Image (cartoon, rainbow, N blue to C red):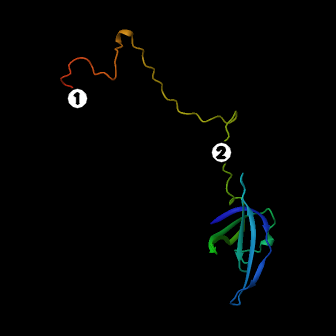
Amino acid sequence: MELTARLVQVLPLQSGVSKTGNSWQRQSFVLETDGQYAKKVCFSMFGQPDQNKPDMTTFAIGTMLTVSFDPESREFQGSWYTNLRAWKVVEASATTVAPNLTMPQFGMNNPLPQQPVMPTITPKNPSQDQVQSVNPIAPPMGDSSSDDLPF
């Protein structure tokens, strides 16, 4: 997965030694998405800085970054925890930033798009002598021999 957003915070580097004696490093950082409802997202990178995982302190706060990451969730004592592991971080160029998708604004300079015009059919008014009184409930008057209904 990928996310392009603005760097807002770099957390202190954490390091230690595992039970097996291997040393480890974890760098966490926070990005904030753009938009009306901006979201802050915390990522973690494990391992030594390299070509794909740069030292996060080299980026200035406010820099647009594109982060490739894998989400992972785990259960601990009945609660679930989600970790976003970044495996590649690059500075976003102008071409990789997602376009601003907004609804078109209509007004004096941008009129509404024209709707197709449907033809209108105006019925002719029948004269009084052409109008027949019809009761939709009563059967038609006349020969009822062709009527096979019981009522």
> Within the image, what quadrant is residue 11 found in?
bottom right
Numbered mark located on residue 68 in the image: none
Q: Is residue 81 above or below residue 39?
A: below
Whole-angstrom CA distance, mark 1 to mark 2, is: 63 Å
Count how many numbered circles sit on residues in the image. 2
Q: Which residue is mark 1?
A: 150
Nearer the observer, disc 1 or disc 2?
1
Q: Circle 1: is it few (<14), some (14-19), or many (20+) Cα within 10 Å?
A: few
Residue 42 location (% of width, % of height)? 72, 67
- Viewer-nearest residue: 140 or 54: 140
Residue at (77, 72) in percent of width and height? 56
Residue at (21, 21) in percent of width and height? 144
Seen from this angle, which residue lies furthest front? 151
The kind of residue tagged 1 is Pro
Q: Which residue is mark 2?
A: 103
Q: Secondary structure at mark 1?
A: loop
Q: Circle 2: is it few (<14), some (14-19), or many (20+) Cα within 10 Å?
A: few
